[in-house]
Image: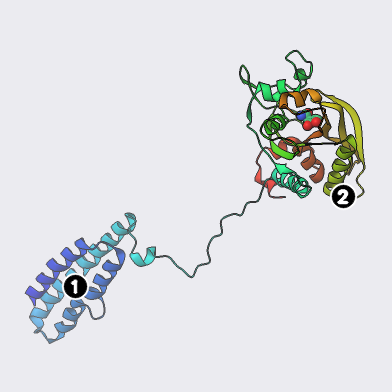
């Protein structure tokens, strides 16, 4: 019996030492100290042993129980501290409902741009694009804006290096398209533009959509008809629209277009686009026959239109990327 206890002590301590996770430790505890455990059996068997031996052996067995208990407790603590939880504890609970990743949606400016492009696409316009970092030639020169022309001062331009700018307008896409495509053309070109400008209604980067249509016999009436159709589709049937004479170097005649916008503070005219008949000088740069073809062009501020549609009073809300704002759309 004494020998049995000694053996148990050596083996059990070794096993406790070798255990590498909590479930193994628990299995070992049950095997030794559990109701049918090896030490428990020994303790139970003490009854059959002669009295004088029983006392000594009983004491030994109880002491061993305490030693093993203690060894297991400290092993348990060590395992818990080292983070080696049992495989069972670590396992996935496949019955738990999944955690959904937050769902995003297009930015309000993108939603508006998409809607505008779609209306023109329905009318037969194709979508074109050009680079944000643009040659001064396309941004100004080829759009009939000579170096010393005051119109260059209308835009405060970010220069990348001499001859290269961040485009101040989407109008250079007109020239890039005409260079590659013989008439007739009908395109819209959405994109980012940049100006040295920042206040409540100006951001140094904003969005425009350019439009260009060239064919035989295109008139200002076509321009008006198309834009009025578009504006009423976008802002609602009864929307009041106003064409004001204006100046742009690449169109002649030129106009700005306002819509009468209803706010909580009453009605006000909101300027949302510039337009006009393509200037013959621009056609010369494009190598289009300006005796044979005429065309109209327009450029609209997408941010402006988004602000009007959603009654947003500062353009900066659109570019701060504050989710509390963006989630409302
Ligand atoms: N590019 C002009 C601007 O940014 C807007 C514009 C006006 C575009 C007249 C046009 C146009 O195509 O014909 O202010």
Here the colouring is rainbow
Q: Position of residue 75 (x, y in %)?
A: 26, 60
Indicate whether 284 appears above or below 77: above
Label 2, ligand 1: CB separation under 8 Å: no
Is the residue marked by circle 1 packed among few (<14), some (14-19), or many (20+) residues within 10 Å?
Answer: some
Location of residue 284 in the rendering, given as x and y in whole percent from the top left corner: 75, 24
Q: Quadrant of residue 164?
A: top right
Using the rendered image of the protein, determine whether residue 196 is visible from the camera's viewpoint. Answer: no
Please report the residue visible at 81 percent of the width from the left and 31 percent of the height from the top.
292
Give the left or right position of residue 25, taking residue 193 as reference: left
Disc ID at residue 62: 1
Badge 2 local density, few (<14 within 10 Å), some, or many (20+)?
few
Q: Position of residue 244 (x, y in %)?
A: 91, 31
Q: Ligand 1 shows up in which quadrant of the image?
A: top right
Give the Cα distance between marks 2 and 1. 91 Å
Would residue 182 be visible to someone looking at this image?
yes
The reply, left or right, for residue 176 in relation to residue 81 is right
Front residue of 1/145: it is 145
| Residue 22 on image: x %, y % | 30, 64
Which residue is depicted at the point 65% across and 33% down?
A: 130
Q: Is residue 143 left or right of residue 25?
A: right
Q: Is residue 315 above or below residue 67?
A: above
Q: Is residue 51 above or below residue 26?
A: below
Q: Quadrant of residue 162?
A: top right
Q: Quadrant of the N terminus?
A: bottom left
- Judging depth in this view, the residue of 30 and 183 nearest the camera is 183
Q: Residue at x 61, y 54 (%)?
A: 103
Kind of element beneath mark 1? helix
Nearest the eye: 43 or 213: 213
- Badge 2 or badge 1: first in the primary sequence: 1
Residue 236 shows which numbered tag? Answer: 2
């Amino acid at each position: 019996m004494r020998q049995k206890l000694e053996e148990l002590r050596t083996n059990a301590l070794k096993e406790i030492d070798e255990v590498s996770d909590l479930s193994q430790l628990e299995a070992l505890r049950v095997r030794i100290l559990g109701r049918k455990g090896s030490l428990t059996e020994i303790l139970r068997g003490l009854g059959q042993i002669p009295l004088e031996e029983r006392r000594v052996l009983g004491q030994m067995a109880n002491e061993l129980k305490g030693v093993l208990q203690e060894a297991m407790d400290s092993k348990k603590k060590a395992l818990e501290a080292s983070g080696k939880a049992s495989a069972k504890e670590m396992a996935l609970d496949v019955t738990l409902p999944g955690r959904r990743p937050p769902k995003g949606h297009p930015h309000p400016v993108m939603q508006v741009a998409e809607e505008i492009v779609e209306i023109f696409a329905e009318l037969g316009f194709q979508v074109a694009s050009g680079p944000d970092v643009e040659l001064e030639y396309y941004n100004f020169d080829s759009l009939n804006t000579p170096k010393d022309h005051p119109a260059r001062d209308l835009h405060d331009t970010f220069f990348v290096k001499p001859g290269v700018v961040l485009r101040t307008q989407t109008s250079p896409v007109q020239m890039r398209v005409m260079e590659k495509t013989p008439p007739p053309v009908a395109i819209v070109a959405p994109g980012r533009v940049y100006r040295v400008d920042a206040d409540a209604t100006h951001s140094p980067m904003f969005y425009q959509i350019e439009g260009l249509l060239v064919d035989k016999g295109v008139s200002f009436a076509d321009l008006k008809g198309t834009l009025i159709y578009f504006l009423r589709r976008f802002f609602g049937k009864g929307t009041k629209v106003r064409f004001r004479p204006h100046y742009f170097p690449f169109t002649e005649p030129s106009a700005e277009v306002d819509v009468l916008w209803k706010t909580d503070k009453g009605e006000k005219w909101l300027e949302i686009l510039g337009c006009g008949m393509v200037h013959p000088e621009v056609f010369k740069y494009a190598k289009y026959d300006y005796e044979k073809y005429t065309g109209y062009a327009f450029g609209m501020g997408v941010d402006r239109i988004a602000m009007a549609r959603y009654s947003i009073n500062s353009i900066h809300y659109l570019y701060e990327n504050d989710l509390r704002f963006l989630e409302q759309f």
